[in-house]
Amino acid sequence: MSPYSFPLALFAFFGLVAIIPVWMWFLNDRLPGLPLEFQFIAGLVLPAMLLVFLGSWMQPGGA
């Protein structure tokens, strides 16, 4: 990672950390009233976002 992309990566990480409590509140407060299909999709959004975020940090070819 270049020193120029580190501030952007740090900003993305803090944004991810900031959205997790809001999403967990949404899942606990609003999810029970939604249809089962929406509950399934809403339950998968956060893990999928985390996998995409972690995958963006991985670089092919190893060290």
Image (cartoon, grey):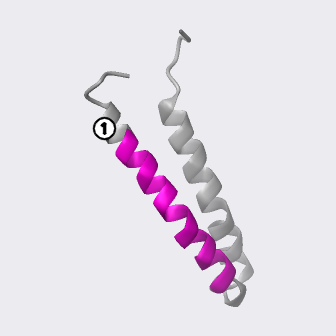
Please identify the dominant SS of the magenta region.
helix
Q: Is 46 on the left-hand or right-hand side of 35?
A: left
Q: Is residue 9 above or below residue 45?
A: above
The residue under the point 56% across, 62% down is 20
Residue 40: x and y in percent read 71, 69
Please identify the quarter of the rendering in which residue 62 is found: top right
Q: Is residue 31 above or below residue 21?
A: below
Secondary element at image label 1: helix
Q: Is residue 48 above or below residue 33?
A: above
Q: Residues within 10 Å of mark 1 (few under 14, many from 20)?
A: few
The residue under the point 53% across, 11% down is 61
Residue 1 is covered by the magenta coloring: no
Residue 25: x and y in percent read 60, 77
Query: Which of the pair 54/37 is nearer the observer?
Result: 54
Please identify the quarter of the rendering in which residue 2 is found: top left
Q: Which residues are magenta?
A: 10-29
Q: Is 44 on the left-hand or right-hand side of 54?
A: right
Q: Is residue 28 above or below residue 12?
A: below
Check the picture and name the quadrant holding the N terminus.
top left
Amino acid type, residue under disc 1 in the picture: Pro
Query: Label 1, on which residue?
Result: 7
Residue 14 is covered by the magenta coloring: yes
